[in-house]
Image: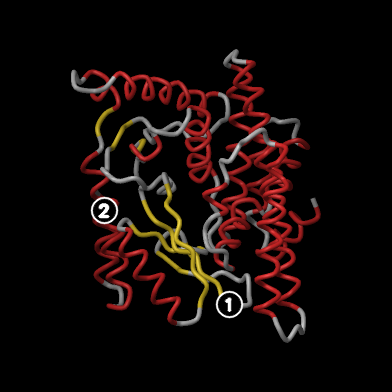
Amino acid sequence: MKKILIIISTLLLMSCSHMGYYWQAMGGQLEIISKRQSMDDVLAAPDTSSELKQKLQYIQRVRDFASRELQLPDNDSYRSYVDVNRPYLVWNVFAAPEFSLEPYQSCFLVVGCVSYRGYFNRQDAQAFASELEQQGYDVFVAGISAYSTLGWFDDPVPNTIIQNDNTQIAGLIFHELAHQKIYVKNDTAFNESFAMTVELAGVKQWLQGNGDPELYQQYLQDKQRRQEFIALLMNARQKLAALYASDNANKNEAKQIIFSELRRDYESLKQGWNGDVRYDSFMSQQFNNAYFISVGLYFRYVDAFSKILEQQGNDWGRFYQKVSELQELSAKEREEYLKSL
C-alpha cells in the first residue's frame, strides 16, 4: 500500500499529457493486485479444475527451483495466482520510423526509458499504435503473457501463461524473475537479452535436473529450431540496417524485397522441421521495422551473455556478479563489450 500511495502521489505531480497513460497503468496493476489469490487457497478450492491444480503444483516446484538453484530472488513473486479473464496480460506497442531500426522510446517512472509502451487494454494499445502510424511510424502490437514489476510488487502467476506447455511456463518464470535480479535503466536490449539468457540456461538446468531425458531432448530440438528461426530474422534485420544506412534511392522497394526473401527463406528452413509450423502465425503478420525491433531487443546479446555464463563456469553467482559490473559502464561501453563477445 505504501508503494501504491507513493506512485499515486507522484502521478498527481505530473503533467496532464502523461496522466492518461499512467492512470491506465496504475488501474491495470491495481486490478491484478486486487484479484490475486494465494496459490494454496486456489489449490484447496473445490471448484479448481484438476488441470489448473496440476499446473500450479508444477509452478510451485519451478518457483522453488528458481531461487534455490538459479539464485533468483526468493520473494513472494509467482507464489500467488490471478485470473484477469483475457488472453494476454498486456499489449506492447513497438514503433520505428519508416526507414530506421531505432525504436520509438517511452520514458516512465522507476523503469526509465524503454523501447515499447504497454497497455492493459488492447483497444488502448491499438489507439496508440494508430496515432503513431498517422505520424509515419511503422508499428507492431504484441500480446504479452507476463511481465515483471521489478520487485515493486509481488507478481502473481497470471492465467495468461497457464495454457503454455510446462517448459514454456518455467522459462517465463525464470525470465521475469531475472528482471528483478538485474535491471539497467534505459537499456531494453540489455535487460531483455539478459533475461532471455537466464530463461534458456535455466530451463536447460531445470530439465536436466528433473530426470526427464525425453523432454530434455525435445527442448534441445525446440531450442535449435528457435535459434535457426531467430538467426533468419536477425539476418533480415541486418539487411534492413544496411539498406537504411545506404544512399539507395528506392528504399521502400528494397525493403519489400528483403521481406519477400525472408518469407522464402523461412519456407525453405522449415522443410527440415518435420511439419513443425509453430512460427507460421508469427510469419503471417505484416512485416515492418517495428516487428524487427521486437525481435532484436530480446535476442541481440543472448550469445554474449551466454558466453559470460560459460566463462564463469556456469556458476550463477559469479555470472550475476559479472553482469552487475556491466551496469557501471556507460551504455556505449556496455554495447561495445557485449558486441566484442
Question: For residue 33, which numbered disc appears in the image?
Answer: none
Residue 236, how many percent across, how many down?
A: 70, 61
Q: At x 46% / y 69%, what residue is drawn?
A: 106
Side of 37 where 254 appears, left or right? right
Provide the secondary structure element on which disc 1 rests: loop
Side of 116 where 228 appears, left or right? right
Provide the secondary structure element on which disc 2 rests: helix
Foreground tag (1 vs 2): 1
Question: For residue 4, which numbered disc appears in the image?
Answer: 2
**Which tag, 1 or 2, sits closer to the chain's start?**
2
- Give the residue type that dot 1 points to: Glu
Out of 69 and 93, give the one closest to the viewer: 93
Out of 204 and 229, give the one closest to the viewer: 229
- Give the residue type that dot 2 points to: Ile
Residue 56, how many percent across, how many down?
A: 36, 24
Q: Residues within 10 Å of mark 1 (few under 14, many from 20)?
A: some
The residue carrying mark 1 is 98
Q: Could you tell me how far apart the alpha carbons at marks 1 and 2 are, in whole angstroms?
A: 39 Å
| Number of numbered markers | 2
